[in-house]
Amino acid sequence: MVETTNLEVVTPSATLVSEPVEMVVVPGADGQIGALPRHSKVISSLDRGLVDIFNNNKISSQIMIDGGIAEINETSVTILAERAEKIDKANKQVLEEKLLTYQSQENHNDQNIADLAKKNSSFMKAVLDKIG
């Protein structure tokens, strides 16, 4: 039987993933971090990039995150990210519509709304670039 570690990817609005996986590779602020079962305890800030999820000795899925924090220990990997999208489940048309909505808010009178729209637009562009 293959050893696994429990992966959770959490955003403020949802838990995107909560499942056992063989290995996870996350975009750490100082470089890629590969986490296997029985990994030593690590807390790391994350950059924008892909989380590679491995099962059956290959990448089974990918999630684009917009930075965040990862907590890795012997039995689990928990990723807290402000924004995240499953690449293999992404609907290009829906993402393009979200991008247009965010772009329309970039010049909003409320600076907080404008700033958030710019961050969301930037992230949607990165996701769309990744899915092609």
Image: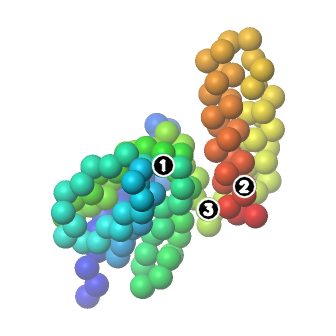
> Which residue is rendered at x = 45% and y = 57% of the image?
27
Where residue 7 sits, quadrant-wise, is bottom left
User: What numbered label is drawn on residue 47?
Assistant: 1
> Which residue is rendered at x = 54% and y = 65% of the image?
62
Where is residue 123 shown, x and y percent of the image?
Answer: 64, 44
On screen, residue 131 above or below 102: below
User: What numbered label is drawn on residue 128?
Assistant: 2
What's the distance in space between the residues labelled 3 and 2, CA to CA? 9 Å
Amino acid tagged 3: Ile
Amino acid tagged 1: Asp
Which-is-in-front pick, marks 3 and 2?
Answer: 2
Furthest residue toward bottom: 1
Looking at marks 1 and 2 on the same chain, the residue that comes earlier in the sequence is marked by 1
Where is residue 30 shown, x and y percent of the image?
Answer: 39, 54
Amino acid tagged 2: Leu
What's the distance in space between the residues labelled 1 and 3, CA to CA? 17 Å
User: What numbered label is drawn on residue 87?
Assistant: 3
Furthest residue toward front: 30
Looking at marks 1 and 3 on the same chain, the residue that comes earlier in the sequence is marked by 1
> Which residue is rendered at x = 75% and y = 26% of the image?
106
Q: Residues within 10 Å of mark 2 (few under 14, many from 20)?
A: some
Quarter of the image where the N terminus is located? bottom left
Left or right, residue 108 beside residue 74: right
Q: Residues within 10 Å of mark 3 (few under 14, many from 20)?
A: some
